[in-house]
Image: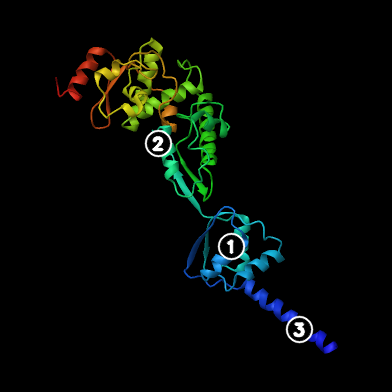
Amino acid sequence: MRRLAWCLLLLLIAAAAAYGWIVAAPLPLPQPAYAFTVKPGASLRSVARDLSASGVLPADWILIAWARISARDRTIKAGNYEIAEGTTLGRLLEKLTQGDVTQTAFTVIEGWSFRELRAALKKQPGIAPAAADLPDAELMKKIGAAESAPEGLFFPDTYYFATGSTDASLLVRAYRTMQQRLAAAWAVRAPELPLSTPYEALTLASIVEKETGRPADRPLIAAVFINRLRQGMRLQTDPTVIYGMGEQFGGNLKRRDLDADHPFNTYTREGLPPTPIALPSQASIDAVLHPATTPFLFFVSRGDGSSEFSTNLADHNRAVAKYQRNGR
């Protein structure tokens, strides 16, 4: 009996040593940097089975056993993973339970409309749909926004996310970033601007974003609109008309389009449109809240991205004739 007991003890010690070696030994990866995905809801057993089939694990039970011994068999997280040469079984389990995932980037482009942002989210691999198909008001409620109209409220930037993240979570981040940036810029705005709220500043910044072809012109373009608002002049800006036309816009703005009244037609209506028309950049927000000091009231594109600025209608008409009508 003593011999049998000693044999069993030696076998247990040998098994523990062998298993300890397996846990600490580098995994036999099929390639130097092996990438795999854990889908939402996947069990440890299914992940271990896939890794074993790929040659990463000598057997699926090894990972399962180690996870149960360390009481971590129910804590794996979904996402994209990458394991490098030298990764051990213990390190692999740590990555799976800590959510040490590789991240994907999604860039929100300044000047996008919210419709374009929706479309880009739907095309982005790895983002789970949760909000992009909802009506505007429902979407805004879902992400905890006070506003019902989403236009202009998401800050253009590059956001990093793990596979399986929802479009709602990304929109929440972009919305909060815009709220923080806008509040900070509003707090240090120039005095006596003809803007009553941060939302009005955001709306005007979206117009400046769409009108700017050359970054250096941005403060001057902002100044033109600020000067017009101060004097009670209509903004008369094409991008608002185009936005209001929506899918009816065919790519060529006509005189009858400028005459057709609707809430976004700044040729027929005074003041700002009811909402932003695009996602403004930080530069456009700053330009609106710190416009150039200038008497300009008009500008026209020169056709090379820059603009010609004027203080009176006669000079503006000459500039239009020169740059838009071939001198006529």
Picture disc at residue 10: 3
- Percent x, y for residue 246? 35, 27
Between the C-alphas of marks 3 and 2, the distance is: 68 Å
Q: Earlier in the sequence, mark 3 or mark 1?
A: 3
Element type where label 3 sits in the image: helix
Return the disc, 2 or 1, that comes first in the chain's sequence: 1
Mark 3 vs mark 2, foreground winner is: 2
**Quadrant holding the N terminus:** bottom right
Q: Image height check: is 218 above or below 165?
A: above
Q: Is residue 201 left or right of residue 225?
A: right
Three-letter code for the amino acid on which mark 2 is drawn = Glu
Question: Which image quarter: residue 47?
Answer: bottom right
Mark 3 residue type: Leu
Disc 1 element: helix
Q: Which residue is mark 2?
A: 116
Locate residue 31 relative to residue 326 in the image: left or right.
right
Numbered disc 2: secondary structure? helix
Q: Position of residue 274 (x, y in %)?
A: 44, 20
Where residue 92 appears, x then y in whole percent? Answer: 59, 64
Give the residue type that dot 1 points to.
Ser
